[in-house]
Amino acid sequence: MATVNLGRIKPVFRGAYDNSTAYVIDDIVTSGNETFIAIAASQGNATSDASKWTKLAAKGADGTDVAATLQNKEIAFKTNAGALDGIPIGTAGQALKVNSGATGYEFGTISSGTYSVHAFDEYNNANNVSVSSDGDYFDIAGGNTVNFTVTHADDLVFFNYRNHVYFNNNANGVDVYLMMKASSASIGGSDTKLDFDGQHSMYYSQESSHHHTIYKTYTLKCTGLTVGTTYYVEMCAGKHNNETINFNNPNTNTLAHTRHLVQMIHYKKN
């Protein structure tokens, strides 16, 4: 019976390409992390020779060694330049957020945009203070203050205050307002005015004895104040002319605590 030579009926893997090895058709080798199959018998012909080899599997782009790129406790992100970078872990309670320049990410505290009542304070002064000169600042608080300690630059502090004023048969311009000082309750005329509308903001022309209660409210934004610092606030007065006015002076039925009252609510940014 005649013998029929079918030749090679399947490819043969020969391992890594060796320049000294003789290869025949359908030999498969690897080189440079890629795979090639021989299309012609050859020896010493590199896999780059397209007349002898055909590429079966091409190499992809090199991946990034994440373990080498990142430090311990970092989270990975892709930069605008397409590179891999890491962000150090934040502190307890912080979350990943976009930075203030909108150029990347950072760990930080995310505000919910809501407020909660953090503190309340008030004082009242029932002692009559008679003023017969004009000026921007007269101390009518008798050493009393309310105070708050800033917890966040976006904190809000709401003040409700009133003063009972007696005009002694005189026409007068008058205002009551708030004066604030950092880290000290010893407040004076050179400290920070809040809600001051001028000596002549309220003018009373009546020429007979007259009682009047001045009611005012004011909301202080803590932007620009120092977080962690305690601020002290008192009610004071400004007056337009040299006629006499009595502050904290009640009429017959006025309760003592309504003559000079300052209430404060400190709203903390959550």
Image: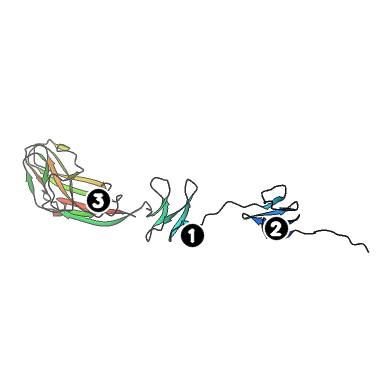
Name the spot of residue 3 as percent of width and height, x first. Answer: 89, 62
Identity of the amino acid at label 2?
Thr
Q: CA distance from mark 3 to mark 2?
A: 79 Å
Q: Which residue is mark 2?
A: 21
Q: Are marks 3 and 2 in contact (CB under 8 Å)?
A: no
Crowd class of label 2 (few under 14; some 14 to 19; many from 20; radius 10 Å): few
Mark with earlier residue (3, 1): 1
Do the residues under discs 1 and 2 have CB atoms within 8 angstroms?
A: no
How many marks the image carries: the answer is 3
**Disc 3 target residue:** 226
Residue 121: x %, y % from top left:
21, 56
Quick check: 225 left or right of 237? Answer: right
Residue at numbered disc 1? 67
Of 13 and 56, nearer the camera is: 13
> Residue flagged by tag 1: what amino acid is it?
Ala
Q: Nearer the viewer, residue 82 or 128?
A: 82
Rendering coords of residue 26 (x, y %): 75, 56
Q: Nearer the viewer, mark 1 or mark 2?
A: 2
User: Where residue 6 sits: x, y (%)?
Assistant: 84, 59
Residue at mark 1 to residue at mark 2: CA–CA distance: 39 Å
Mark found first going from the N terminus, 3 or 2: 2
Sequence-earlier tag: 1 or 2: 2
- Residue that appears at 44% across and 54% down: 86
Question: What residue type is disc 3 on?
Answer: Thr
